[in-house]
Image (cartoon, helix red, strand yellow):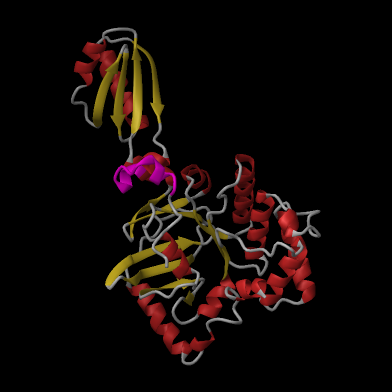
Amino acid sequence: MPRISRVSSHSPDTLGGRHRRGRSRQLQGAQEACTSAPARDLPAGYGPAGGDPIIEARGLGRTFKSRGRTVDAVRNVSFTVHRGEIVGFLGPNGAGKTTTMRMLTTLLPATVGDALIAGSSLRYAQEQVRRSIGYVAQGGGAHPDHRVMEELILQAQLYQMTRRQAEKESRRLCALLGLGGLEDRQTKTLSGGQRRRLDIALGLVHRPELLFLDEPTTALDPRSRNTIWEYVRRLREEGMTVFLTTHYLDEADALCDRILFMNNGTLADEGSPDDIKRKLSADIVTIELNGYPEDAWRVLEGHVGIREMTVSGLALNLTLADGDRAIPGLVRALDAAGIPIAAVRVSRPTLDDAFNSLTGNLPSRQRNDLACSDLAH
């Protein structure tokens, strides 16, 4: 029965039992290891919920053997995710995202390091970890001939919920995720967006504390993508923590409170989307003049903070780290020189610009396909 096999591979009752013996002693050692390694924490006061850590990864690493040589797919990855955050996990192909995601969801053992997920060790308490998380894979997995409610109830019962509890929670999720009225439909008759919302419901039916989403809107049309975004935000409003991978940088920019960038198997950078864009890219300040562009060039040449300056007709285009902060000084300098200004505008960098800067000017076709084929096999 492929459906039961698929779900039970992520359910707490069929995996992880071999670590029960001596667990208290092992957990103590794991917690000490996790608290001793350095982590990249949020700045003080940051975060929409300001909650306690729900993921504390410390020195995670994964090594594979390939053609007689050792490949370090993930090396010494440490980070913290706080309760109530939506965190995006980005990086180019082969960066180690999928490998890290599989380790965090107990689908792949770490070669070195550990992580506490909702207080439970990945190494020594996998059953507790699985009860605390929901995982929505990129490809989904609902049985095409099963009905929506049938799928949800089966998934809930695999987590030892009673029939009554399973039905109640399944109906709540159908209402929350816009599946009301579709409970008796076979899943193969659903649209792409409806199937994806069902996949998310299957990951939530046992009421986890943390939801992992792997490419939640791949192959969806723009309207369906926006619908998924709204539901993800609604989940966060209900207290859910969401950890997602995506190859749509606009999605990460719109949804995520914080972004973790992987590159070459290590955590290359992290921060809010605005912080990352500001740090890795730059603003473009365009000053439109009523005349004297050469004089304006001479006035601003060498001005502190200007990385690059070009002239286009009666306009100066200035590349700066923080355009808003620089504008008052630029305007004062030109005004003091008697150069009339017609208009000033700032163009913000995109997350794509930041990604391009971080990963070394990858070709656009590779930048637009960020998370499809990591070293995960």
Q: Nearer the viewer, residue 265 or 41?
A: 265
Whole-percent x, y for residue 16 in the image: 52, 82
Question: Among all residues in the image, which is located at the extreme front?
Answer: 67
**Residue 351 sits in which quadrant?**
top left
Residue 275 visible somewhere in the drawing: no
Say whether residue 28 is left or right of residue 224. Answer: left
Query: Is residue 269 covered in magenta?
Result: no
For the point 29% across and 25% down, the residue is 318
> In which quadrant of the rendered image does the N terminus lie?
bottom right
Residue 195 versus residue 324 in the image, above or below = below
**Residue 280 sits in which quadrant?**
top left
> In which quadrant of the rendered image does the C terminus lie?
bottom left
Residue 226 versus residue 331 in the image, above or below = below
For the point 64% across and 40% down, the residue is 223
Whole-percent x, y for residue 184 in the image: 81, 60
Say whether residue 336 is left or right of residue 47. Answer: left
Q: Nearer the viewer, residue 236 or 313?
A: 313
**Residue 80 sits in which quadrant?**
bottom left
Residue 89 versus residue 107 in the image, above or below = above
Question: Among all residues in the image, which is located at the extreme bottom?
Answer: 21
Q: Nearer the viewer, residue 339 or 95?
A: 95
For the point 49% across and 92% down, the residue is 21
Residue 16 visible somewhere in the drawing: yes
Whole-percent x, y for residue 135 in the image: 57, 65
Per the rendered image, the range of residues in magenta is 356-369
